[in-house]
Image (spheres, helix red, strand yellow):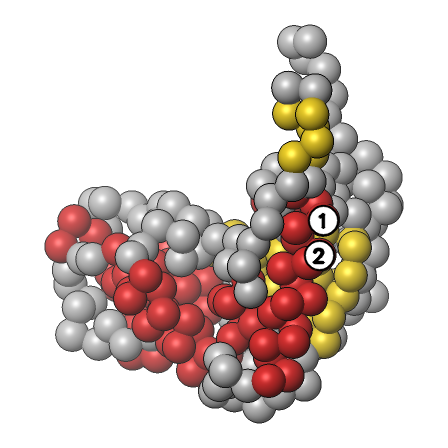
Amino acid sequence: MRGEKIEALRDVSFTIDKGELVSVLGPSGCGKTTLCKVIAGLIKPDSGRVIVEGEIVKGPSPERVMVFQEYLLLPWRTVLGNVELGLEIKGVPKDARRRKALEYIKLVGLEGFEDKYPKELSGGMKQRVGIARALAVEPKIIIMDEPFAAVDAMTRTLLQMELLRIWSKTRKTILLVTHSIDEALMLSKKIIVLTKRPGRVKRIIHIDLPYPRDPFNYKLQNIRKELWKLIEEELVGEAYGRKISCSIPY
């Protein structure tokens, strides 16, 4: 019915340690993006609360920034201008915000592209600008909602490597929403698996393996099988009155 309220999440509870890189996995429509917006303070939960370092989240804050699937760059601003945006909003003086923006442009590998406009950049480069913009305000938490979904497979792999490199240098707390089990396996210290809607925490899997990870490592292969099984269970459903199951090869 029009205007009917949809319950996206239910009784979701988990803890992220400072400096962790954590992934959230789950079937489409299970509330992953809603979870991101709740943590960012963009949506107020009907019940429960989000606590960051002992403080209850009551609304948006530069301490919690989001990197979206869409690049959301301002087309009339250069790379430098886009990265400076958050600092400008915070009231950082011009010279100081320029220095800081240039520092993070270099960190994401875009040195030399400071004066380019978004239309002159590839998809992967645009997403790097988005990551640099998020890092520049020096948040406590970076929330990434399918940040690499819009790029091709090769660029996605390169961006994953870049994210690991950046994380290893900054040790920022990162929450990464992804539909890719392999992406979660290669990047995460911890994987939170959600059920179908309303999303609940089905399992939390810790990965105690060093970086960079070998995708053929037997421990990683076993975790991959476990994750496929957990997701497969959520993909089982009713269609046209009969039971269907999605079988996914390991």
Q: Position of residue 213 (x, y in %)?
A: 50, 85
Give me the C-alpha separation between circle 1 and circle 2.
Answer: 5 Å
Quarter residue 34 falls in: top right
Residue 109 or residue 84, whichever sits in front: 109
Q: Position of residue 157 (x, y in %)?
A: 36, 70
Residue 18 higher or lower than 56, as above or below: below
Residue type at mark 2? Leu
Question: Does the residue at mark 1 contact the one at mark 2 (Cβ under 8 Å)?
Answer: yes
Visible in this render: residue 218?
yes
The residue pinned by badge 2 equals 230
Visible in this render: residue 38?
no
Helix or strand or loop: what does disc 1 sit on? helix
Quarter residue 191 falls in: bottom right
Helix or strand or loop: what does disc 2 sit on? helix
Where residue 204 is drawn, which disc sits there? none
Residue lying at 35% horizontally and 79% vertically, measured from the top left: 107
Residue 95 higher or lower than 6, as above or below: below
| Image-based side of 159 in relation to 169, left or right | left
Residue lying at 71% horizontally and 56% vertically, measured from the top left: 230
Q: Farthest residue toward the top? A: 1
The residue pinned by badge 1 equals 233
Residue 202 or residue 46, whichever sits in front: 202
Q: Farthest residue toward the bottom? A: 210
| Image-based side of 154 in relation to 131, left or right | left
Residue lying at 69% horizontally and 40% vertically, measured from the top left: 236
Residue 6 or residue 132, whichever sits in front: 6
Residue type at mark 1? Glu
